[in-house]
Structure formats: C-alpha cells, structure tokens
Image (cartoon, rainbow, N blue to C red):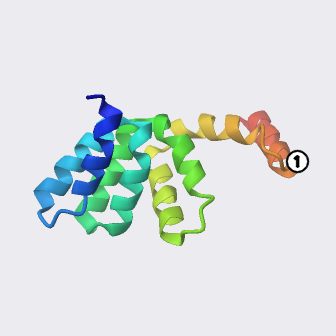
Amino acid sequence: MKCDEVLPDVEAVLGDPEADVRWAAMGVLGAHGQGAVRGLLRAYGDGDAQSRTLVLNAFRGMGETAAIPLMEALSTGDAELRAAAAEGFVAIGRSAIGVLAARASGHSDADVRAYVRRRDCDS
C-alpha cells in the first residue's frame, strides 16, 4: 500500500475523540508533506488549541513544501480554511516567500506581477 492510499484513513482519524489519536494522525500527515495539507487545514479548523498548535508545527516542519497548497486554500470561499492557511504561512515563515514570489510573478493580474518585481528589486 502506498502512502497516498492511506491518507484518507489517517484524515478520518482526525475526528477521533481521543486527543492522543488525533495528535498521532497529525504527525503522520505532517510527515507526508504536500498531499496532506488539506487534511491538516481541516484539522486546524476543527481542533482545539493543542491540535491547532500541532497542525502549525506540522506546517513548520513541511516548510515551503506546504506553500503552494496553502496559497490555493487562500482562494477558497471558506473563511475558516483561508484563516487556517494564513496561519500556516505564519508558521512556515520566511522560507515560503520565494515560493510565493515565484508563483505570483506569473499571476494573471499585472499589478501583482509589478509588485513582485518591485519587491525583488528591494531585496
């Protein structure tokens, strides 16, 4: 069985009433990388303070690997999902900046592309 095949089962455990079980599932998802970002975002939105901290630590551990899925989550209509994605970026920190700048430099909006070029010159 491939790692990707077990993600839905691990994500299902995120709703377990036992905190230790949820935390173990978050650890597995955090180690999995980009494919697990959606499940972690859901866990962040549904979790208590300790669970949210674990999710943010998972994003921090993923680093820039999580940046693209987090950026996509910022475009959803779900306000809680957008907030969780923003918190994920804060957890990742400066390592996400290069990924975001590269993605934004190809943006369809000319103002976004111009801003990225200005920021590159300021660095």
Q: Is residue 9 left or right of residue 84?
A: left
Between residue 31 and residue 49, name the one nearer to us. Answer: 31
In the image, farthest residue toward the right: 110
Q: Which residue is label 1 attached to?
A: 110
Image point (44%, 38%), residue name: 34
Residue 58 x/y as whole percent:
33, 45
In the image, farthest residue toward the top: 2
Between residue 43 and residue 95, name the one nearer to us. Answer: 43
**Can you say whether 66 is above or below 16 in the image?**
above
Quarter of the figure with residue 1: top left
Element carrying mark 1: helix
Image quarter in which the C terminus is found: top right
Residue 94 shows in the view: no
Q: Is residue 75 left or right of residue 93?
A: right
Residue 60 x/y as whole percent:
38, 43
Residue 39 shows in the view: yes
Image point (47%, 35%), residue name: 65
Residue 84 x/y as whole percent:
45, 61
Between residue 44 and residue 97, name the one nearer to us. Answer: 44
Residue type at tag 1: Ala
Residue 48 x/y as whole percent:
26, 69
**Can you say whether 95 is above or below 112 in the image?**
above
Quarter of the figure with residue 122: top right
How many other residues sit within 10 Å of disc 1, few (<14), some (14-19) or many (≥20)?
A: few
**Can you say whether 2 is above or below 107 in the image?**
above
Q: Is residue 58 left or right of residue 105?
A: left
Count of marks placed on residues: 1
